[in-house]
Amino acid sequence: MWKNITTKVDRRRALVWGMALLLAVLVLVIAGLLYERHQLLREGAQSEESPQSPEGVSEEYSESVALYGEALEAVGEDYVDQEEIDLKEQTYDAIKGMLDSLGDERHTRFLTPEEMDRDKKVIYREISTGVRLEDGSGEVVVLGLVGGSPAEKAGVEPGDVLLAVDGESVQGRNIIEATDKLKGPEKSTVNLTLLRDGQVREFSMRRTELEVPAASWYLIPETDVAYLRLALFSENSAKEFEDIIAEAQEGGAQRFVLDLRDNRGGRVRQAEKIAARFLPARSVIYSERDGHGEEREVTVPKDNEPLSAPLVVMVNEESKSAAEIVAGALRDNERAEVIGETTNGAGTVLDEYPLSDGSGLLLAVAEWLTPKGDSIRGSGIEPDVEEGLEEGQIPRTPDEIRGLSREEVFAEDAQLERAFEVLQRG
């Protein structure tokens, strides 16, 4: 019996030492990455690549790693509930705690391997059936379908007239009210009653998460104003944005409202290209200031040919990061008035640090300043014209208001109405 107990203790200690060694390696990698980045910034080096693990770690970081190792060993040796010890969970929680202590709650964060995979492609998604509606002579008509969507798979076709959703008639409703009825929890079932070629048809489908375009537009009826919406700054959003501007101009647009509300940011290089679309050559888009106070200006290319059409920008408290860069650049260069609410204030430059198990850090290594030198971090972009939405209103996409009259559009969106008024007086 004594032999069995001794064997269990030895095995437990061997397991704990293995856990401690693996965790120490992970923490050393993190400390090393931070140390090397610290050295690169001190030397003024700039790189698009993520830094690699250095050969050594400074004494300061080594002491911290050793201290953590002592705590880990105590837990592994003597914690009362050994079966509850989960090395990976402990490691991830330790890293999260370290990052939380920095106080950059808006931006710096830890990503699991799964989250790292998702973060590689910044996309905009919505829970939807994939049906796009329009108003057709008093009827709610299917304008189009998202490719691969539940509605497309169920057999819904463009031109179908929507009669009811889950047995409730949408006759006499506008497309915003009808679209709202199509929304619901992911994987929930929705039943559509449609009219096609004089025959009533029933379709059942499950709502799912769908990827939608980053950029879209709609010409406000009886005007030359195009409502341009940017959902976020994805890998190809600058190209998408260029395409919708061209489409809008072909459709008669001569003035523009750029909607950055609820835009949570994304690729900074895409934001630079979109801001440059409206700014003269050599204009300052923003500046970066690192932890040592050194600043670097980012400017519009010298051969840039901007669009000179009248422009206003809409933002709200959910406009973040790269969206704040664009709003600040257009405001400070006096290219556009900003309408809405003060933005989120997530104004830091993130570098990605992959770790050995596929997880990683998104670490704030510098902060953004507007062209006039105002820090975005924590303060956000203050609009030139303060305007909130009225009770019951939410920002609507161009697809959701397509087919409505100008009066109906403005009745659903007080901020868009105010933006239109500012364009009118300009």
Image: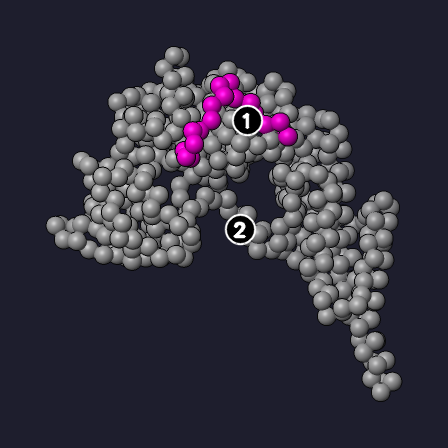
Tell me the amino acid under the disc marked 1: Thr
In the rendered image, the vertical position of residue 367 relative to residue 117, given as above or below: above
Query: In front here: 391 or 395?
Result: 391
At horizontal 38% and vertical 17% (from top left) the residue drawn is: 421
Comparing labels 1 and 2, the label whose residue is closer to the camera: 1
Dot 1: within a 10 Å radius of its alpha carbon, few (fewer than 14), some, or many (20 or more) residues?
Answer: many
Calculate the distance from the C-alpha at mark 1 to the C-alpha at mark 2: 29 Å
Asked whether residue 152 is in view, the answer is no
Query: In front here: 165 or 53?
Result: 165
Q: Residue 114, image x and y in percent? A: 57, 55
Q: Which residue is mark 1?
A: 342
Left or right: where 103 falls relative to 184: right
> Residues in magenta?
377-394
- Of the residues under marks 1 and 2, which one precedes in the sequence? 2
In the rendered image, the vertical position of residue 111 relative to residue 323, given as above or below: below
> Could you tell me what secondary structure mostly forms the magenta stretch?
loop
In the rendered image, the vertical position of residue 394 relative to residue 191, given as above or below: above
Magenta segment includes 383: yes
Q: Residue 206, image x and y in percent? A: 36, 57
Query: In front here: 327 or 140?
Result: 140
Say which element carries label 1: loop
Say which element carries label 2: helix
Q: Which residue is mark 2?
A: 118
Tell me the amino acid under the disc marked 2: Arg
